[in-house]
Structures are given as structure tokens and as C-alpha cells.
Amino acid sequence: MQATTHDLDIVLKPLSRPELGEIRIDGSVFAVGRTEQPFAAYAHDILEMLSRRHARIFCEEGVVYLADLDSRNGTTVNRAAIAQVPCRLRDGDEVCFGGVLSYRVEIVPRASNPRSTAEGFSLTLTPASAGLGLQPIVITRFPFLVSKNDEAFSRYHHEHGRQLSFLSRRHAHIFRKDGGACIEDLDSSNGTFVDGLRLQEHAVPLEDGMLLAFGGDHFTYRVSISKESGVEPTQPGARTQVPQNKPAERKAADVAPAASDKTTFVVAPTSFLDIFCVDETPSEGFEPTGSTLPDVPAKEPARRRSRGRSAVLLSELVALFAGAEHERTWRSWWKGAAIVAVLGGAALALYLRGAPERELKDAVARGEYAQAASLANRYLEQRPDDAELKALATEAALKANVPAWLTKLQARDFKGAEAVLAGLSELGIRNPDLRPLVGELEWLGNLERLVSVRGGPDAPIRIYVDEDSISALIGRWNDNTGEHQRALARIASHVPQFAAPYAEALTHLRKLQSDATVYLAAIERLKASIATELDRDNPQALEAVLKETAEKYPGLGGLDEVRQDLARYIEIKREARTRKSGRVFSVVLKARFTTPPFQEGFRALGVGRQLPGEEIVRQYADATQPWKEGRATESLAGLQKIAAGPWAEAVAGELARRQAVLAQFAALQQSQGASGYAEQLLAFRASLDPEEDVYFARATQADLALQKDKALLRAQESMNRARALWQEYRNAGVIEAAQRVETTISNTFRTRARLLSDARRQAQLAMQIYAQVNAVPPAQWSTIHDEIKVEAEQQRNALLELRNVLAPELLKAKLALLGESNDDAPKSP
């Protein structure tokens, strides 16, 4: 290599993070990555945006290049992304790594000392095993690419073809650094090993005696290093150039066997352009500035590039003046003047054409981003295809709006953030480069809104609330992850304060992706079960399903709402089937469902006329309001008017119930002061509907307060009976699976079921009395009540699981012996 980085002073001067200091590049290859120095010492928010093998800066033929190594968040030069081909760097260029680290490149030639002596440096790779037929490799020029296509290895195609297949086309490379040599694996499939340890993302120095292995243990070599002062690395003319159209295959003159055919001498280096070119196909290289990479000298002469119009005019002018010196004719001078005028006009046109860019750059430099964005939007109307103008417009628009958007987002003002993006979207009407970036900001805003509404990244995923939003967010990201990362990194390169929120959003996304893997599938299974059981008209089966799901997935939210809707739905279905009381009207009036399947199920019941129609429900409500206010006569007259039609039986039942309440209330007033009044008062209060009989509850509240001591004594008696029955049930033995699965109701099942049912009824009565007098039950009574309730529910659920085994009538009879399941909660009218 004729020139290395030692002939140039290369400095990266920080733009986005001045506090990190400048970076001076001294070696032939400079590694950029989150585990490389000095980057490894940077803050976490920076390291989040860098890849382990992010980029490389190197020098080739006195020219500096930058190569991106397929990094996650990309690399840009002068705000243009570089991808698979190394990009030439010039003095003054702006480079950005991962969207967070921006630098100004400073390249200055270094004066050489003609009297300095060169160091003859060579590296020999001697096969570790002499019996394999491998030849030593002597490397005198660097870098050296280890490749299965290189003559040093491809010569073993026939005798070692299988082992050769373990090498990659770009396997590893050996290069000079700090007076010695280093080796770096190029992300090969089967790895590079130094003294038995596989190389990771770092290059490591080579020392005498080290053992190198490529792709396994077959191509294994012992390292030997030789240094000679004052000796030129190669003799003049010994270096054979590599044709640019075959980067991975050096000719026999470059890798030449010795006369004895026992040693392979490598006298020509591999181009760094070939080593760090991600694309497997040859390429000329890419430069955002529009220039081309210099051709590597080859045997065939390179084609001369066609000259531009300005160059042609200038050439013509020079030739004209030369001719004028001979001919000295006025015609030649007039022709020269005309050409000068044309050149001047062209220069003026170019100057005027560049005026918008200069004005925009000046506004951006002054920090007047909103003004710059407005100017750019106006100029784009006249020049919609100007790439440089679009790049400046994008930068100005992002710098003018993203900081305000971040402020709104951090304040959880999501509507305000949407308003900022709406303004940014208007600027994107004329700028197609800006539109996808606005879409990325919208996605990130939706992600943060979801996290906030849920209560944080660790909050449960709520069924029927979060799953669709989560699926949409993750699906959009997974659709083209690399493109999203590059777009967001581009935003961060223009707006450095965007990097930290972006890194936090990626953390939230990873947590969502992890949770979604488990919980979204569980939610879909639960939804399917709910739909299936509702279609079967068997909602009771869902009680066990919900219990099992809650135990298996403790991080699943929204199950309480599903349980409440299920309980309301079962109650409505039960009252609709019996039609023996007006309670069906009451439950329909207060029915409020929050989950979609039960909302749809309730509507279906109404459409199927399993529930009373809207008109009769309204008439019932009109007759009920006077009842709640104590105008009993008016209420009863209203019910009598609607006691006809398909729901006549239910209306008549409610009419009879209210008449009975009136009679009991009158009798209670007659017996005030008499013996047994407390028991009669408690029984009356227990019979009241807590929602419809509120007038009578208020009318007896004062008497209940006077009878509180007697009421507490009655509650204690009920709990004592409940405890005795519970103890007898446990001593006799709980209901076992053999009794539940019997095809008849045995005496054993009947006895034990009644003991459990009576214990439960007495415990419930005691709890209701405590609730009526606003007293807290003793802890021991609460414990016994809970134990009885749990056992009763477990027995009911176990029976329900046998719905496909037991006959429906038999199952119904066994459940009836256990008592109702929805009357555990104490009701205080």
C-alpha cells in the first residue's frame, strides 16, 4: 500500500457531543463500535444506538474511506446514509454514527521524512500439523484477506474441499497496527480462533507463537513475526495490482509459490475496499457528495470520465487564447470574449441557483429552524426534485418541530404532540423524504401513549383493551425493522435530544414484544373459549375457565371486568328463563356490560325476545320510581296497567311481591315493642331488594339501630350454627369425586351437600346482619365464612366440569342441593 494513515492526520471533531472530545486516528484501520475504545466509555444512551461492529475508517491509496458494517442504526456522511459500499471521506465532511454521534472530519497531509528508514515487516503462518499437506504462508504486504477464494487457500480445493467450505469469502483479515499486526474476524460463519478462543467483535494483536485457526481446526497455523530495519518492504515492481473487478481473487503473481512449491509468498495486499464492502458483488463505491472512488491501478487502462460543460468551455477558452497567440486575429478575441461572457453567465446562474441553499444553511446555522423550514417548503414548490434542497428542508423541519414534540410527549400531552406532527405533516406535502419520518414519529408517539395509558411498561396487558393496539404496533415494527431503525436514527442525527427517548421507546418495545409472546396468545385462547360457551348457551362454564386463566397468567389484566359481565349475564339469563318475578326488569334496567362478547350477547337476547322489550321496560321503570319514593298506591296501579302480554307473569309476580312487602311493613309497625320484634325486623330487612325497596330500608333504619345489640346476638347465633355444621361436614368427609360422578343422587352426596349448603346459608345470614347494622364481624367469623364459601364454590365448579358426563337434570339437581352461587356478598338495603 503506497500510503497509509501514517501519511495523513485524521481527526474526528465532535459536533453533537462536544464534551466527549475529539478522536485522533493513527492506525491503518479505526474501529467504531459500542465495545471499542473510546466509545465503550460513553453513556448508556449512546451505546444503545451503536452496534458492536458498527463501522470502520481506513486509508487506501492516500484516500480515506468510511464503511458501515450493516449496523442497526446506520451511518451517514453529510446526512446521507451509506449502506453496503465504502464511502470516501474528505476534509470537512460530517459523519454520524447511529444517529447520536456526529463529527466533523479533519484530514491534513503529514510531512514525511525522506531520511527515515522503512521497517521490513513480514508475518509467516506455518501449518501447525505437518501431515495435512498445507503450505506455509509468508505475508509481506498488508492487509491480507483470509478467503476461501484466495489462491493461498483455494489451491486446496481438491484435496481439502470439505474443510475449505468452512471458510467464508470474507473470513478474516490481518492488518498493520502500532508497529505490529492484528487480526480481525469479519463476522465469518464458522469463526476465527486465536489460541483456541473464538474472536468476537474486537481485533487482537498477533504475537510470535500464537496459534491461528480459520473455520475450525483444519486450517491451523503457528504465527512467526520478522522485523528488519532499513529494508524496503518489497522490491520495486514486486507488487502486482489487483484488478478492481475481482476483489476477492488475487492472481498467481500476487500469491506466488516459491521454487520448491513449499511456501506461499504474499507480496500484494488486499484492498480495504474489498474487505469492508458488505455487498458480495463488485462495486465502484458510493459517495454522497457525488464524486467517485479512485480506480485501483490495473493492467488495462482506466477509461477517462467525460468532462462537464464547464470543463469543456474552459478547455476551449485556453485553446483559443493559445491560438490567438499565433493568429492574433480580432475574430479570435471576439470569440474568446463570447466564451468568457457565457462562462460568466453560467457562473452567475449557478450562484443564483444556489442562493436558496445558502439562505437555508444560514437560517439553520442561526438556529432559526422554523423560518428555514418555511423557506424550504416555499422553494420546494418551485424545485420539487432538488435532492439537496429536500435534505435541507428535512433537517430544518425536524429541528423546528421534534424538540416541541418531545416536550409534549414527555408531559403526556398526547393531543398536543399530535398537533405538532400535524404541522410537520403539512411540510411533508411537498417533501416526500420527510413523510416517512413523520410516520415513524407517529408510531413512536402511539407506543408511548399505550405505555402511559396502561400504567407503565410493566403493567398487565388488559383483555379487550390493549391487545389490538399492541399487535398493530409490533406488527408495523416487524414489517421492516431495519428501515424503521434507519429512519429513527436519521431523526436522531438531526435532533440529538431525540436519541434518549428513542432508546427508551426501544426498551418499551422489547418489553411489549416479550409480554406479547405469552399474553396475546393466552388472550386469543380465552376469547375463543368465551365465544364458544356463549354460542353453546353455557356461560356458567366460563367461571372455571376464568379462574384457571387467572391462576396461569397472573400478568393478564381486565379479568375482573370479564367476571363482572359474566355474573350479570348469568343473572339476566336466569331471570329471563324463570319469568316468575319482576326482577328480570330490574336486572335489565341496571345491565351495563363493558366487554364486547357480553355486550353482543345482551343485544342478541333482546333481538331474540328472550328479554322484555324497551317499551315494557320503560313502563316498568315509570311504575317503580313512585315505589322507591314511598308512593306505593301509585306504583301498584302502574304495574296493574302493564300486567298483560308475554311478560304478564313476571309483572304479576313483581306486583305480588310489592303487595307482600307492604303487608309485612304494616305488620312490622303493628308489632313494635312486642317480643320477637328484632327477629321480625331482621327478617323483613333481609327480604328487601337493596335497589328497589330503598324506601322501606330507610323507614326501618332507626328501629334497626335501636335493635343493634339484639341483631349482633342473632348474627353470633347464626355463625355458631354455621361453625357446627361446617365442622360436621368436615368430620363426615367432604364431597368426593366418586359422589359427584354418580349417575344418581346417593344418600352420602345428599347428606354432605345439605350440611355444606346449610352451613353456607347460616354464614351468609350472619354476614348480612353485620352488614345491615354496619358492624365489622370478628376475624374468626370471617375466616369460617370464607372457608365455607371456597369449599362450596369448588364443589360447584367440579360439578360444572362434569356437564358433558352427567345428565342435565341430574346436574341441575345436584347443584340445587349445594345452593345458589351468587348470594355470598352481604346485601345491605
Image: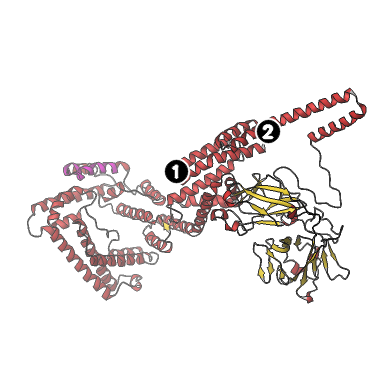
Which dot marks residue 413?
A: 1
Kindly identify the residue that appears in the image at 61 percent across and 37 percent down: 393
Q: Main secondary structure of the magenta part?
A: helix
Q: Which kind of residue does numbered mark 1 sit on? A: Asp
* Residues drawn in magenta: 617-635
Is 621 displayed left or right of 418 in the figure?
left
* Label 1 element class: loop
- Residue 581, placed above or below residue 757: above
Q: For this rendering, which residue is in front, 143 or 491?
A: 143
Which dot marks residue 274?
A: none
Kindly identify the residue that appears in the image at 76 percent across and 47 percent down: 293
Image coordinates of residue 765 in percent, x first then y, are 21, 61
Q: For this rendering, which residue is in front, 378 or 339?
A: 339
Q: Is residue 629 magenta?
A: yes
Q: Earlier in the sequence, mark 2 or mark 1?
A: 2
Q: CA distance from mark 2 to mark 1?
A: 40 Å
Residue under label 2: 354
Q: For this rendering, which residue is in front, 420 or 140?
A: 140
Q: Quadrant of the N terminus?
A: bottom right
Q: Which kind of residue does numbered mark 2 sit on? A: Gly
Q: Is residue 143 magenta?
A: no
Name the residue furthest front.
Answer: 115
Label 2 environment density (alpha carbons within 10 Å; few <14, some 14–19, many ≥20): few
